Image: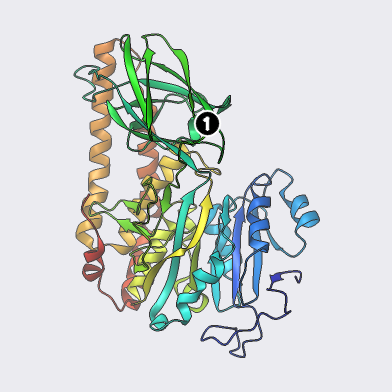
Amino acid sequence: MSSASRSNGDGNGAESSAVSSSDGSGAGPLATVVIVNWNGAHLLPPCLDALAKQDAPFAFETQVVDNASADDSLELLASRYPWVKVVRSDRNLGFAGGNNLALRNVTTPLAVLLNNDAIPEPDWLARLLAPFDEPGGGRLGAVTGKVVFLPRFLRLTLATPTFSPGPHDPRQLGVRVSSVTVDGREVLREVLWEKLTFGAEGPPKAPFFWTRGDGELCVPVPEHGQVTIGVTWAADTAKDVTLGWDGSSCTLPVTAEPSTVSFTVGAGAPRVDVINNVGGIVLTEGYGADRGYQQIDIGQFDNPEEVFTACGNGMAMRTELGQQLGWFDDDFFLYYEDTDLSWRIRSRGYQIRYVPGAVLRHVHSASSVEWSPLFVFHTDRNRLLMLTKDATARTAISAVARYPLTTASIAVRTLRQAWRSRSRPAVRPTLLRVRVFSSYLRLLPTMLRHRREIGAAATERRVSLQSWLVER
């Protein structure tokens, strides 16, 4: 290993390839792997250790962009990973700006993005880059792999009678879960229950989840051995809840007051991999989404195929194309920056391919909390920014006009609920949406300029690209 590169042991990693080196001689590194880090000293070792063990027939460089971390990330990198080139920022530039700090100086033919909370399989990089040299690879702008959640999971089903909170809340609710433990360790934030709950509610430091009447959840568990799972929950009244897993089930009580119950799952219960991302989609309403999100991985995405967008975690791209496009949009900071870049890649007539054999294991929301104010602000605002830049005028105008109308509707509904319940209105969600739209309006002139520039350089019409959008 050199100070900034890693090879398979022969010193040069040369390979005959259409993209094998910067100068065409095959003598230099093929790719630069860029990792953005912010206070991630606890995340970097598994990521970098796995990267050092890549079984690749070529050399590659590794760069870590440190976004002004306040922990001991820099000391860790200097002492344990001297082969990593560290790019230091004096402030937190987010995912978009942090990556750009390194990407704008990359000289290798390919650039690869990797999250600091992701662990690549040993053949991940070789499989990710292989399509660029395969037949038809000349029109590939980017390649994206399979991202599964870390660790493995126990698949559970839940069933219980529901109730309606009243006319101000049309949901049919099951039980209110405020804690989940595995062998005594709290895992509430690590549970995957997109198909069961209505999302996190309550204060950030003490969230809870209301379930539906039935559905499934995936609980992170050790790879082997029996486990004891504890649940703290409450409901509208005393009733039973049935939890099931492969080959077994149990029925547990819940009352109107929070109580904790536990059950033991035998060592033979199967563990499953759960998909985080297998390429991306954009819905017709303009929302980006992870293809395959929270599906059990049973091989349904085991065939390579073209996809509309690439995931910023585990994405490989032609450096020359990235330079032409200006890489990520710095104004996005984090979220939707990869969807925006993918849309612009396609506007130049390039394809994006999903490669199932390039597998990453990802710690979900390790750097930011899903549905936190930070998350909501950037996903809401950046969706509008992306559509303004990349979508047809009709789609963009519709989404932008709908946002303040929905905000006003939420404000009126919140006031009505507070009046009926004789309580103080929950104004924070509405105020957050006002902040989102104010920030969008501030950036609107810049986005309109980008829109004109994208249109002038495009080889694919916007209306043609929107054939990729899918119905919800």
Q: Is residue 278 above or below residue 269?
A: below
Would residue 420 appear left or right of 260 to someone viewing this image? left
Q: Can residue 27 be seen in this view?
A: yes
Q: Which residue lies furthest to the right in this view?
A: 79
Res. 446 visible in picture: no
Front residue (pair 97, 259): 259
Task: Tell me the SS state at disc 1.
Answer: loop
- Quarter of the image that includes the N terminus: bottom right
Question: As displayed, is residue 185 above or below residue 448?
Answer: above
Q: In this view, does 303 lie to the left or right of 364?
A: left
Return the x and y of residue 152 as percentages of the image width and height. Answer: 50, 43
Q: Name the residue under label 1.
A: 187
Which sits in the foreground, 353 or 428?
A: 353
Residue drawn at (53%, 44%) of the image: 151
The one nearer the camera, 193 or 424, is 193
Q: Which colour scheme is used?
A: rainbow
Given the image, on which type of amino acid does mark 1 rest?
A: Val
Residue drawn at the location 36% of the way across and 45% of the way down: 380
x then y, percent, for residue 97: 54, 58
Would you call the spot at circle 1 few (<14 residues within 10 Å), some (14-19), or many (20 or more)? some
Q: Nearer the viewer, residue 46 or 311?
A: 46
Q: Going 25% across and 17% down the picture, which residue do you hit?
A: 165
Which of the 4 quarters of the picture holds residue 272? top left
State the image coordinates of residue 325 (x, y, percent, origin top left): 44, 72
Q: Tell me: 257 left or right of 163.
A: right
Q: Residue 71 appears at what percent x and percent y? A: 71, 43
